[in-house]
Image (cartoon, helix red, strand yellow):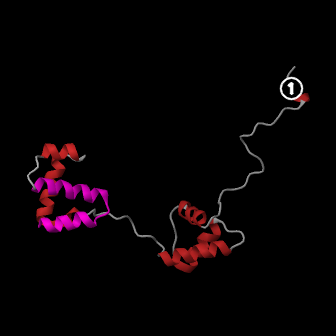
Amino acid sequence: METDLHAFLQTTTDVREYRRAIAVQLALQGTPYATIREVLPVSKACISKWKKIYHALGTDGLRIGYRGSESFLTATQRTEVLIWIAAQTPCDVARLRAHLQDQYGVVYQSDQSYDALLHAAGLSWKKVQASNPKKTTPRSPRNMPN
């Protein structure tokens, strides 16, 4: 059982999984929990928990369960959309929203997702202002207080 733990330590790229496996390995070797806590930033309860999980499920139990949500667009579709955006002369959120809905059946809940696609394509989606609102205008001599 410890050979699979050693192989797991060699292959995992997630720091949290690695920390769990090291804690379990040290506990199985008889290292006192107080010493493990000094070496790793884990609690005694976590060491016990992951040791029990390892005995029940093996190294599969040490893996992080949550991997994030799936994207609405596949990698290929995203690339196609970025190429489409680059080919559009003026491209804004409304136009992108319509394209995604028509071509891929994708409707995002927030404009932030559309903004992220425009940004990934190298476009700025901010509205242009005629002048900088933070800039102070110089006073003309007529407007100067006496």
Amino acid type of the residue tagged 1 in the rendering: Met
Q: In this view, does 86 lie to the left or right of 66?
A: right
Q: Does the magenta stretch include residue 14?
A: yes
At label 1, counting other C-alpha atoms closer than 10 Å, the crowd grade (few under 14, some 14-19, many 20 or more) is: few
Above or below 99: residue 113: above
Question: In the displayed image of the protein, which residue is found farthest to the left?
Answer: 30
| Quadrant in the picture for the N terminus | bottom left
Q: Quadrant of residue 100?
A: bottom right
Magenta span of residues: 1-28
Q: Position of residue 69 (x, y in %)?
A: 39, 66
Image quadrant in which you'd find residue 134: top right
Q: Which residue lies furthest to the bottom in this view?
A: 103
| 128 to the left or right of 50 | right
* Residue 6 part of the magenta segment: yes
The quarter in which the C terminus is drawn is: top right
Question: Which residue bears the numbered disc 1?
Answer: 144
Q: Residue 60: horizontal and vertical position, in percent?
A: 21, 67
